[in-house]
Each structure stands twice: as structure tokens, then as C-alpha cells.
Image: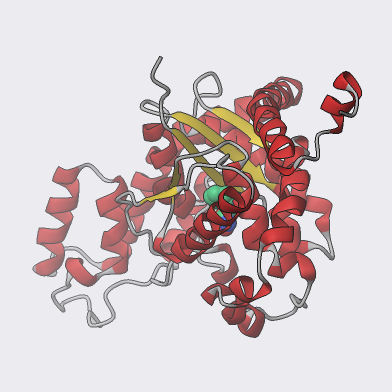
């Protein structure tokens, strides 16, 4: 029996999902589930590292994200989809890994100092925030995952996960494969203002936005800043709006618009209307499926429960190996007595 490679990926439950999640993560998950044993999860405990003062929305974000995943094509029969906090083994392994993780490794993670400095309005000088990469490592090695799809900004977190896994393996016994980063080509999704699409920039088009909301957002989109008058020729290759055509419009239409824009035969306002139509049409099936799923909350939660149960099976196997490696296996002592 050759085991397929195990892929693990997670998403923090910190808000509504947007087009950046769709093109950056979800489409990739849908593709990966065809070829690998995939574990995809909602990192609700990780959401608390920054949102600990008001965790009241975390559960709702988790359930809604789950509907978005399935609406986007993640198949809960193929991939194991689950919630971090429904698999308490994540917490146990996090604790054990924290024992072998030198503080210096955590303090050196580039995003750590940067975020401590830059994130405004919350105090991130907590134990939990410093330990974010340890919990993330537990998430990964708990499933003895081989591959972790990562964006460039997450590469340093995976590096520390590899080091922690290596440290555990050499101190006790080799239990964990060293997880490899799986760099996948993902489309860059700009926000309405041309910066990276992100909830915190307020420039996102959410997967759950209504047609009216999408239209209003499109009308506020930044376009080619060098095109001041309607009669100026535009530059689709650098225009923020055109980036959306590339993502969702049929190629013939994108080409036609680009050609007309260069000749100033179409204006930005007209083009905003066009892209709104395209985005609305693109998101319509997803939105409908999402609403169906959320209408039967019980069935959705049941999928989550079942997925989390499947996750616990593999997590339980790993934890048995971990406890044995540490010699902290009281279950065995109780069965076999002290020798
Ligand atoms: N840090 C990831 C994010 O920002 C979420 C996450 C938590 C994760 N644990 C993980 C991703 C393990 C990959 C593997 O969304």
C-alpha cells in the first residue's frame, strides 16, 4: 500500500472570505484534493491570537467560511475538513512542542516583530501570539503532513515548523515527517484600491456580497491613474480594474476591453459596469450554493462534526506515537502495569 502524501492547510476564522481567499487558497485546495490526502481546517484558536478581546464572532466566521469552502468546490467526502478546536489534540501537542521550542526561534520569526510593531488597536504582547508558530507546527505535524501549501509570507513559519519537528525527532524518536512547503502558482488578487485584497484594508469583495454590493464596490474601484480624461488612452496591463478582467472575464471579452481601452474607445465608468456584471455572474453560483448550505445549518454542522471526527482519528494515532516517544504513556501503564 502506498500512502498518498498528506497535505495540510488552514485558514484563520477572522472574518468573511473574499476573492483573495478564493483565488489564493480555495481554488488550490479544490485542485489538491484530487491528488492528495488533504486536511483543511478552520484555525479558530489561531483567530484568538489577535481577536482574544472579543471572540464572539469566531464561531460564526468558522461556519460561514466552511460554507464558502464547500460552495467553492471543496468536497467534504474527499478532503477532511474540520475545526481546530474540535480536535483538542492540537492543544496537547502544542503544549508538548512548546517545551522543546527555544524562545529565540520564536522571537526571530520576521512577521512577529513586524506585527508587534504595526498592528494597531490591540496588544499583541501575549504568550499566545508569540507561540503562534508553535500552534501552527502542532497543526501540521499532528497529521504527519508532508506538504503545506504556503504563500511567500508564510515561508518563515514553515521553516520554524521544520526545525521544531526536527528537534522533537532527534530528542526522542522520529515521529514527524519534516513538512515541505508547497509553493503553488496563485493569481495575485488586488483590492478595490490596488493594494493586496485584505479585510483590514477595507478593499475586499466578499464571496457573500450581494449583486448590489458588488456593483457599488466596482464603481469605487481604482483604475489606471495615468488616464485622466475619457479621451486619454488607457493601460490595461497596469490597470487595477483590468486585473479583475483577467481573473473572471472570458478571455475574448478581456481582450476586447483591453483593445478598446488602449484606443480610448471605452471609458473607465463603462468598464466598471462591465466588470461588475462579470463579477456578479462569476460569483452567482457560489453565492447560491453558499446560501443553500447556510439555510440548513444542522446539516452543515454535521459535516463539520464528521470531518473533525475523521481528523481526530489521525490525530489520535499521532498522539499515541508522541506519548510513547516521550515515555508519557499512562494508558499503557494502566493496561500493562509498571515494569
Ligand atoms: N497561519 C495561517 C493563516 O494565517 C493559518 C494556519 C494555522 C495554518 N495553522 C496552519 C496554515 C497550518 C497552514 C498550516 O491563515
Figure label count: 0
Identified at 42% across, 23% down, the residue is 3
Percent x, y of residue 112:
60, 75
Q: Is residue 197 visible?
A: no
Which corner quadrant of the image does residue 271 belong to? bottom left
How is the model colour-coded? secondary structure
| The one of 259 and 169 positioned closer to us in this rendering | 169
Point out the residue furthest to the top here. 1
Q: Residue furthest front?
A: 339
Task: Determine the residue positioned at 47% across, 61% down.
Answer: 159
Residue in front for this viewpoint, 241 or 104: 104
Q: Position of residue 332 (x, y in %)?
A: 82, 26
On screen, residue 315 versus residue 281, left or right, reads right
Residue 52 in sight: yes
Tell me what residue is drawn at x 63 percent, y 27 percent.
Answer: 314
Compared with 333, 55 (above or below) is below
Expressed as whole percent of the image width and height from the top left, the position of residue 42 reads 64, 43
Position above or below: 205 against 195: above
Q: Quadrant of the C terminus?
A: top right
Quadrant of the image containing the N terminus:
top left
Quarter residue 153 falls in:
bottom left
Q: Residue at x 78, y 39 (%)?
A: 88
Q: Is residue 292 above or below residue 53?
A: above
- Pick whichever, 339 or 4, lies toward us: 339
In the image, 230: left or right of 107?
A: left
From the top left corner, tell me how far across and down residue 47 is, in percent: 70, 56
Query: In the image shown, does 144 or 33 lie closer to the viewer?
Result: 144
Amino acid at each position: 500500500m502506498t500512502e498518498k502524501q498528506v497535505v495540510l492547510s488552514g485558514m484563520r476564522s477572522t472574518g468573511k472570505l473574499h476573492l483573495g481567499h478564493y483565488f489564493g487558497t480555495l481554488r488550490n485546495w479544490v485542485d489538491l484534493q484530487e491528488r492528495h490526502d488533504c486536511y483543511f481546517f478552520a484555525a479558530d484558536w489561531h483567530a484568538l491570537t489577535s481577536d482574544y478581546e472579543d471572540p464572539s464572532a469566531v464561531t460564526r466566521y468558522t461556519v460561514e467560511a466552511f460554507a464558502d469552502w464547500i460552495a467553492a468546490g471543496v468536497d467534504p467526502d474527499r478532503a477532511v475538513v474540520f475545526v481546530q478546536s474540535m480536535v483538542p489534540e492540537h492543544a496537547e501537542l502544542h503544549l508538548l512542542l512548546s517545551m522543546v521550542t527555544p524562545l529565540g526561534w520564536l522571537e526571530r520569526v520576521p512577521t512577529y516583530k513586524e506585527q508587534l510593531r504595526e498592528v494597531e488597536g490591540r496588544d499583541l504582547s501575549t504568550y499566545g501570539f508569540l507561540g503562534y508558530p508553535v500552534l501552527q507546527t502542532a497543526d501540521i505535524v499532528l497529521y504527519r503532513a508532508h506538504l503545506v501549501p504556503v504563500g511567500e509570507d508564510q515561508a518563515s513559519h514553515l521553516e520554524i515548523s521544520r526545525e521544531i519537528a526536527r528537534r522533537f525527532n532527534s530528542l526522542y524518536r522520529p515521529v514527524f515527517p519534516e513538512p515541505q512547503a508547497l509553493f503553488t502558482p496563485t493569481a495575485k488578487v488586488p483590492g478595490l484600491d490596488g493594494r493586496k485584497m485584505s479585510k483590514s484594508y477595507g478593499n475586499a469583495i466578499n464571496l457573500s456580497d450581494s449583486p448590489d454590493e458588488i456593483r457599488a464596490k466596482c464603481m469605487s474601484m481604482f483604475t489606471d491613474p495615468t488616464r485622466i480624461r475619457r479621451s486619454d488612452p488607457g493601460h490595461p496591463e497596469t490597470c487595477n480594474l483590468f486585473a479583475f478582467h483577467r481573473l473572471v472575464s472570458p478571455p475574448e471579452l478581456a481582450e476586447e476591453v483591453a483593445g478598446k481601452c488602449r484606443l480610448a474607445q471605452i471609458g473607465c465608468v463603462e468598464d466598471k459596469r462591465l466588470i461588475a456584471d462579470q463579477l456578479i455572474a462569476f460569483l452567482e453560483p457560489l453565492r447560491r450554493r453558499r446560501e443553500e448550505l447556510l439555510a440548513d445549518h444542522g446539516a452543515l454542522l454535521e459535516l463539520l462534526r464528521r470531518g473533525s471526527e475523521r481528523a481526530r482519528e489521525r490525530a489520535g494515532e499521532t498522539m499515541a506515537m508522541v506519548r510513547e516517544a516521550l515515555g508519557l504513556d499512562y494508558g499503557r501503564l494502566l493496561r500493562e502495569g509498571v515494569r
